[in-house]
Amino acid sequence: MEQAIERHTISALVENEPGVLARVIGLFAGRGYNIESLTVSEVDARHHLSRITVVTSGTPMIIEQIKAQLDRLIPVHTVSDLTAEGPHIERELALIKVAESGEKRVESLRIADIFRARVVDSTTASFVFEMTGATDKLNAFIKLMEPLGLVDVCRTGVVAISRGPKAQNGAVRTA
Amino acid sequence: MTNHTMNGSQIVLKALVDEGVDTIFGYPGGAVLPIYDELFKQNSIRHILVRQEGGAVHAAEGYARSTGKVGVVLVTSGPGATNAVTGLTDALMDSIPIVCLTGQVPTHLIGNDAFQEADTTGITRPCTKHNYLIKRVEDCARVVHEAFYVARTGRPGPVVVDLPKDILMATGPANGPASGPMQGGHKSYRPRIKGDIEEIKKAVAMIRAAKRPIFYCGGGIINSGPAASQLLTEFVRMTGYPITLTLMGLGAYPASDPQSLGMLGMHGTLEANYAMHDCDVMINLGARFDDRVTGRLAAFSPGSKKIHVDIDPSSINKNIVVDCAIVGDVGHVLEDMIKVWKADQTAPDKAALADWWRQIDEWRARDCLSYKADDKIIKPQYALQRLYELTKDRDTYITTEVGQHQMWAAQFYRFEKPNHWMTSGGLGTMGYGLPAAVGVQIAHPDALVIDIAGEASVLMNIQEMSTIAQYKLPVKVFILNNEYMGMVRQWQELMHGGRYSESYMESLPDFVKLAESFGAVGLRAEKPDQVDDIIKEMIASDRAVIADIRIDKKENCFPMIPSGAAHNEMLLGPDDKADTPVSEEGMVLV
C-alpha cells in the first residue's frame, strides 16, 4: 500500500549538552531520513534545555518512526509533531544580497517594500535585504530577485511554535 | 566520616563495586595505566585479560547473556576503543547490557591528533545506546552510575564511558552527591515498564477469540529476566496455543514441549513459518519482526491480526503495521495478561483450535529437518544431534559463531531454559563464539560450556585460546569443519551459479596441534562412528578442548527461505530448486 509523502515540522526539547546535535544529525543520516531544514538553540539556560526544530518529509509510517527514534535518544526530553498537533506558526529568516544598477536596482527595492523586507546594508552597487516569514514567502521573494541581480542568500531554517495558550509538552518552565 | 578524596580511578572502581560488578574483561594500555594501577591494589573486582579488545566485549556479552547482569569492559584509548566497535555494535543489535570503559588522552590533548587518540565518542555514537566523555573528576561517580542505569533499563544496550587519563589521575571527593546506583529519576530518559491496561485487555480479547493463533516470541523475553520465561510458559500452557521462537528467543519456552513449533524464519521449521503465514492472530511478545523472520514484507502473514508487545516504542510499526501495540516490559505485560485471561472464564473456540493443531501436525509430519544420513561422511546435523543427546542432562551453555553451523545448532540443539544460548543474531559477527564462551565460563566455572563453531569463524578470534589457557577455562570448542565459509558457499551455490569466490578456506591450521600449542586437548573425528567417542572424551575432560569434526563439505542448510521470498515460500532440501529463480530485488538483499 503506497503512502503519500508528507512534510512535517518536528520540535524536540533536548538536554543542552555536548554532542546532542551530533546525535540527532547522526540519527537522520544513519537511517536515511530527510532533513529539509534544522535549527537549534538554547531555550532555557537554567535547566540546560535546547530546542531542535526539524522539517522533514516521508510517508506517515516513516514520520512515526522518526519521532519514535528521536524520542529514544537518551538526552531527548520530548518530541512534538507540530504538523500533526494542529495550528502552528512557522517562520524563518533570510539575508538576501542583490547587486545591480539602474532600473533593476529600483525594481528590487520596490519588490522588497511589497514583501516588507528591510534593507540592512546598502551601497551604490548593492543591497542586502533581511526578510522574515513563512518558507513560501521567502521562496517567492528570492525567486523574484533572481533576474534582478541576486548574488547571495543565507537562510536560518524554520522555527515553529503552536498557536494558542498551551505550552508544547514539557515546554520551558518559567518558575 | 570525613569526606576524604580519591583519584578518578579509585572513584570509578568504587562505583563499579557499588553496582555489584565483580568481573571485568579488558586489555591495558597507556591511557588506562592509572586504573590498572588501582586494580592491582584491590581484590573486589577480578580482571580477565583477553588477547584482543573485541574479545573483551564479546566475553562481556557472553557473561551478560548467561547471567542477566551488565557485562563490563575496560580498554585503552585509540586502537583499544576502535577494536571494541564490532563488539559494541553486536551488543546494540542484540540488546545486551554492556558498560565499556575506554581510556582517552588527557583533556588538553583531545583533538590534537595525540598518540593513541581516537574520537571515541564520535565513532561509537551510532553503535551504542549512549556514550559519555567525562571532563571533570567530580562527574566520575555520577556518570558511571548513569551508564549502568542506561545499559540495563528499558531496552538494554551498550554504553561507552570515555575516561581521559588526567581525569583518572585527578583527585576528587570520595562521597559525591550521586554516589550510588541509580534507581530512576533520569531527567530525560524514562523507559516504560508497565503496559497500558486497556490495550492489554483488548489484546487478551483478541487472543481468546482467535481460531488459528500463534505466539511469536523473541529476545525480549530473555532480556526481561527468568520470570518472564516462566510467565510465558504459564500463559502459553493456559491457552493451549502453538508457540514459535526467534533465534534470540531460544530457551524462553521449553523446546521439548509439544506446543513448541521450533524456530521460525529464514532457516526455521516449515511448521513454524507456515503457521505464522496462515494464522489469524499473531501474538508478538518481545520480538522485532526482523527481516530474517518476515521475508518479503508485502507477503508476510497477510490475513492475520497482529499484537505486538515491545519495550522499545520505535520497534512498533517499524517494519510491519500491527493492530494492537503494547509498550512495556514483556514480563510485566505477561503478568497482567494472565490476570485478565483468568478474570474471564469464557473458553476459546476448542473446535477451531483442534482443527488448527491438526493442520500444524500435518505440517510437522513433513519432517522438514530431516537429512540424508551417511555412514561414511559425518553430517553436521548428525554431529549436533549427538552433541545434544550426550550433553542435555548436564548444565550446558552453548555459544556459536556465525553461519551454517549456527543455524544447525539452533535447529538441533534444544533449550529448555533461558540464558543458556549465546549467539550473535542481529549483527551476525563471526568470531563471537569463542570469546563469548570465555565470558560464560568465567560466570559459571563449573558448567559445561561449548562453542559450536565453523572453522572459518573460529579463526577470527582464535587468539582468545590464550585467555582460556591463562585462566584454565575448560571451554570446549566443537568445530564443524567443512573447509568452506559454509553459508557464503551455500548462497553462492544457490544464487551465484556455483561461483565459489573466496569462500574456500585454504591453509587451515591443524586444529589438533593448534589446541596443543595452547595447552588444550586436541581431538579429531573423521567418520560418523567416531563422533560419540570424541564427544564423550571432550566433555569428560577437565581441560580446554578443541574438537575438529570433519563434516560433509557440500551440505546445505535447509529449510531456507531465499532472500526476497515470502515467509511461506521455502526450499526444503537439495532437490528443491526454487520455482522462480531469485528475483533482482531478492539478489540485492543480504
Image (cartoon, rainbow, N blue to C red):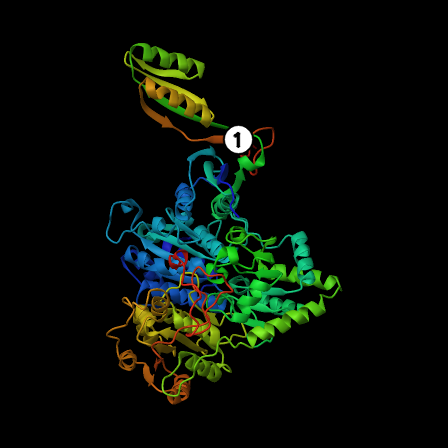
Residue B450: x %, y % from top left:
41, 76
Image mark 1: chain: A
Residue A13's place in the image compared with B256, above or below, is above
Residue B273's place in the image compared with B150, above or below, is below
Determine the image quadrant of residue B460: bottom left
Residue at far front of view: B579
Determine the image quadrant of residue B41: bottom left
Residue B457: x %, y % from top left:
34, 70
In the image, B220 versus B443, the foreground residue is B220
Residue B559: x %, y % from top left:
46, 71
In the image, B273 versus B117, the foreground residue is B273
For mark 1, what is the residue? A161
Number of marks drawn: 1
Residue B32: x %, y % from top left:
31, 58
In the image, B214 versus B29, the foreground residue is B214
Task: Decide if residue B7 is in sight here.
Answer: no
The amino acid type, in three-letter code, at marker 1 is Ile
